Amino acid sequence: MQQMQTDVLIIGAGAVGTGIARDLALRGVSSVVVERGDINSGASGGNHGLLHSGGRYVAGDVHSARECREENELLKRLAPQCIEECGGLYVAVAGDDERYIADFPGWCEAAGIQTQSVAPADARSMEPALSENLIAAYTLPDASLDPFRLSLENLAHAKALAGSILLTRTAVDGFELDRGRIARVHLKDMVRGETRTVEVSQVINAAGAWAGRVAGLVNSRVGASIPLLCSQGTLLVTHDRLSERVIHRLRTPGDGDILVPGGTVSILGTTSVTIPDPDLARPSVREVDVNLTNGAEMAPILASTRYVRAYCGVRPLLADDGSSEADRDGRSASRGFLLFDHENVGLGNFCSVVGGKLTTYRLMAEKTVDLVCGRLGNNAACRTRDEPLPVMDACSWTEPGRSAKVWVMGHASDDEILCECELVSASAVDGLLQDCRDIFPDPDLQLLGKRSRIGKGACQGAFCGLRVASHLYDTGALSSRRGLGAMRGFFQERFKGQRPILWGAQMVQSELAEALHCGLLGLEFPAPESPEVELSHE
Ligand SMILES: Cc1cc2nc3c(=O)[nH]c(=O)nc-3n(C[C@H](O)[C@H](O)[C@H](O)COP(=O)(O)OP(=O)(O)OC[C@H]3O[C@@H](n4cnc5c(N)ncnc54)[C@H](O)[C@@H]3O)c2cc1C
């Protein structure tokens, strides 16, 4: 069993865990981040990418609205490379609650959020996709946020400043207590099954929707417990970008009422379905239908446009927020966050941070690190309010349309394009692999997909999955049958998102992919027992 030691162990590499690693590093503290999947495997990789202005919460949760507004302003200033300042339009259509519409500007003012009324005809000329039935519109300072770039850059900065480490595909599966403290944490390698132990001073549970399960692993006298409600939300990705701005329905938050631009595409969402276990999250056909029906009321094109994929995430909502059983469907639970210090069960070196928003991840990290640094006797102040997040070149391939710009600006004549939908070149793939060598010794298509746009276009990996795998074989990064296994995992993940949206052009695309992957590679057959078996060169 391997042994390691760290001052702070962070469980979960979502926006919050990676934000905590950077905040600690800016205060001179190195950490180990343990993640059972890859970076942003949870809600941070399955959300809308909306940098909230706070407008969504003004009616029911003014505290969260103010938090969002403040963090929105900070992030626009400190991490502009992760944000597209597209602005937002909140729109109501005939039949929507007129009292809500009339009260909206006053609620925004109370939360300090800037709004401006726009005549429905002007709103339609700003956003031609909007319905002819518009009855009111307001501009708000919403924006679009790239959560992958954000988390990657937070981690890269933590590594550069303090040598912090990310252990991917490694799950926490037990704690060892000694005199009322967590002395050691047991980790399990999710691929090889090997175990290792880390000696720790402080442990931070930032496991999102899994935080309750992680807390439950602590076998203390009373037991650390966190009352969480798992609320699945499904989102749809359109083939084209349908609006310049975030389009938001001006009504009590519901399903299918937000359309967020994500570079070259738009993202429609989201539902709210309570599920018993976050591992069971899958986008469903019913949720796709609900999003389409509601979304089309504000932007009719949503009923007929091509969708390339659906995906979902699980909100870690606090179940014990005082709301009645009747309205506990996840929508009414607080979007605020809670920091549990676990001192009530005698654990002075363990804390959990849950709830909140992607938009408020920095604030969540700040409050958590204030607690942990206090426990470590470190009185350095938080610097993430003023210190810009450095631009890291290796993290920039998540930006939609970036590859095209690089291609136009100049490229080597022998630099092949491997992903045609998103124009990702062979040199970009080589650069990404080089950058991840220390955390991913074995090249993996899913790793590349998380750090670039590979597989995100209309073909959903049908062609680029094959081309990238071939390139990895050509350059010696892959050998034996391991490439087939990597492709199988990659295509299965893409198909999970395509399955609920299979009609029209995307159905045709998917049938072509099936013919290629099954007809050419036989990927429908079970994986060989040993992927290391050499391929025949006959
Ligand atoms: C559908 C949907 C849409 C949303 N839209 C928005 C939006 O537009 N704007 C916004 O501001 N917020 C949005 N949110 C909320 C936002 O996504 C979350 O609040 C935020 O991403 C939570 O981040 P996190 O780091 O706390 O959790 P997560 O991102 O879930 O990270 C937890 C990590 O812990 C890991 N983990 C779990 N168990 C273990 C273990 N035993 N060992 C090691 N690792 C473990 C998981 O793999 C995961 O990667 C949305 C959420 C959902 C679900």
Image (tube, rainbow, N blue to C red):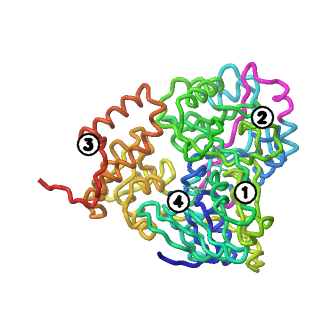
Does the magenta-highlighted stretch encompass residue 91?
Answer: yes
Amino acid type at circle 2 is: Asp
Question: Could you tell me how far apart the alpha carbons at marks 2 and 3 are, in whole angstroms?
Answer: 49 Å
Of the residues under marks 4 and 1, which one precedes in the sequence? Answer: 4
Depth check: give the residue in front, 315 or 153.
Answer: 315
Q: Which mark is residue 225?
A: 1
Mark 3: which secondary structure? loop
Mark 4: which secondary structure? loop
On screen, residue 326 versus residue 442, left or right, reads: right
Of the residues under marks 2 and 4, which one precedes in the sequence? Answer: 4
Question: Could you tell me how far apart the alpha carbons at marks 2 and 4 are, in whole angstroms?
Answer: 33 Å
What residue appears at the point 48 percent right and 37 percent down from the top-left corner? 309
Of the residues under marks 3 and 4, which one precedes in the sequence? Answer: 4
Depth check: give the residue in front, 103 or 436.
Answer: 436
Q: Which mark is residue 36?
A: 4
Region rendered in magenta: 77-104
The residue that label 3 is drawn on is: 522
Of the residues under marks 3 and 1, which one precedes in the sequence? Answer: 1
Question: Could you tell me how far apart the alpha carbons at marks 3 and 1 are, in whole angstroms?
Answer: 47 Å
What residue appears at the point 68 percent right and 42 percent down from the top-left corner? 87
Q: Position of residue 385 (x, y in %)?
A: 74, 65
Label 2 neighbour load within 10 Å: few <14, some 14-19, many 20+ = few
Does the magenta-highlighted stretch encompass residue 135?
Answer: no
Q: Position of residue 538 (x, y in %)?
A: 11, 53
Nearest to the eye among marks 4 and 1: give it. Answer: 1
Of the residues under marks 2 and 3, which one precedes in the sequence? Answer: 2
- Residue 294, image quadrant: top right
Question: Could you tell me how far apart the alpha carbons at marks 1 and 2 are, in whole angstroms?
Answer: 23 Å
Look at the numbered disc 4 and say if its residue's Cβ is closer than 8 Å to ligand 1. yes
